[in-house]
Amino acid sequence: MTTGGSSELVRRPNGSTRATLLELLFDVVFVAALALVSMLIAERASWNGLAPVVIMLMAVWWTWSITSTTTDFYDPDQRPIQAILMVTMLGAVVTAAALAVDSHALVFAVGYVIPHLVRGVVLVGVLHRRRHMAEQRAARFLFWFVVSSFFWIGGALLPDGWPLTLWVVAVTIDYVSAAARYPTPGLGRVPFAQYEKTTEHLGERYQQFVILALGDIILVPTLEISRSEFTLARSAAFLSAFAAMLLLWQIYVLGAGDIVRTAAPRLLRRATRLAPYTHLIMLAGIVCTAAAFDLVVERPTGDTPRRWIALILGGPALALLGRTLFTYQILGTLPWHRVFWLLLLVAAMPWVGGWPPVLVAALVVLMLAGVVTGDALGGRSSRPRLRGRPG
């Protein structure tokens, strides 16, 4: 562990791009929070009450995304950055513990807000008058998280009816301010050049996190089947969950890291700015897929409720949509075979209501296998473009 002098805090261009062990531990904590979100979605008997869960998912993901951007710009081996990671992990644990209980709104808000404020204060304090560019970057982030924190905390303190409204405002501020490059009075926006400083480290971090998150698709059903009898239908549902996890892994890894690690400055800048948003869609799909298989393993036979259909088919569709949008936004080309299967997943929803859940799950596996087959037969056409610079 290094001492963390401010002159060394910004990542060196020739430094290691490997994720540190503390970063991997950080990922595990957040994936556990995502697993809890999946179980909360599965437990909801209707769509009522789902909006707070969506906001919680967006908050959990944003904390991970911003912190990973921090450890890409700053050196994660430095003590101040390690302290930030530890505080953020604690905040994630507190946030996850408060997810399942509506009366814990203040605990959730504090668990979300404190790590962001601590990160900004530590970075601005350590970098003050030493690293002008890095200090301004940290100050921009801190300014906007201070603004949103009033709405996070205020929503938790006000009576019923207000928390959701103010939290929608708060999460909108967090996401929109980042998209606008954190325009701050007296400092302006984050320069485009800073987005081009992205290293292979960030691409590796996104890949690792999504792959760990995919494990929830089998983890959540495993917890369910461990409490149930191993019937033939339930075992088939469990195997479908395992197959879906592997197929979504294959769909994600095709060129994903290459896109984020591309050396072309324009593509790198675009990938860095868009990855948090497209990956949020992917993670929402993964979370819904895990919730769907939790339900299917619990009751694999009988009619499939409409809400279950939306989760079983919609979860993989969201994951596929996020991955397809990521490719399109970076490369400007659409993998049409993936679009075809995406539309087919959506089109199947009105027709499978009378099917047993295990059969709907099997249909999803077949469709995902179709996507992977399309990749193998001709969906890799966009890959060569990743290696060249734009004209």
Image (cartoon, helix red, strand yellow):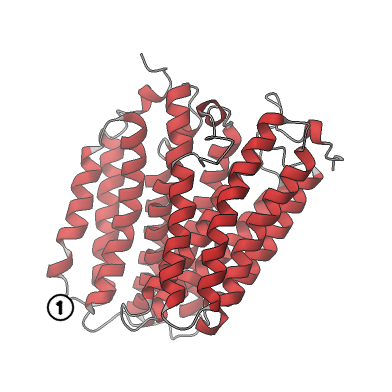
Residue 297 on image: x %, y %? 38, 77
Residue 27 on image: x %, y %? 61, 55
Secondary structure under the numbered disc 1 in the rendered image: loop
At x 59%, y 42%, the residue is: 140
Relative to 289, say whether 177 is above or below: above
Q: Which amino acid type is marked by label 1?
A: Gly
Relative to 85, say whether 11 is above or below: above
Mark 1: give few (<14), some (14-19) or many (20+) Cα within 10 Å: few
Residue 87 on image: x %, y %? 72, 59
When asked about the image quadrant of residue 332, the answer is: top left
- Judge from the rendering whether residue 251 lies leftward or rightward of residue 66; answer left or right: left
Does residue 230 appear in the picture of this structure? yes
Query: Residue lying furthest top in this view?
Result: 391
Is residue 366 or residue 164 the one in the foreground? Answer: 164
When asked about the image quadrant of residue 15, the answer is: top right
Is residue 134 or residue 84 the one in the foreground? Answer: 134
At x 58%, y 28%, the residue is: 197
Does residue 215 appear in the picture of this structure? no
- Judge from the rendering whether residue 82 lies leftward or rightward of residue 139; answer left or right: right
Relative to 17, say whether 209 is above or below: below
The image quadrant where one finds the C terminus is top left
Residue 319 on image: x %, y %? 35, 53
At x 38%, y 79%, the residue is: 49
The residue beneath circle 1 is 354
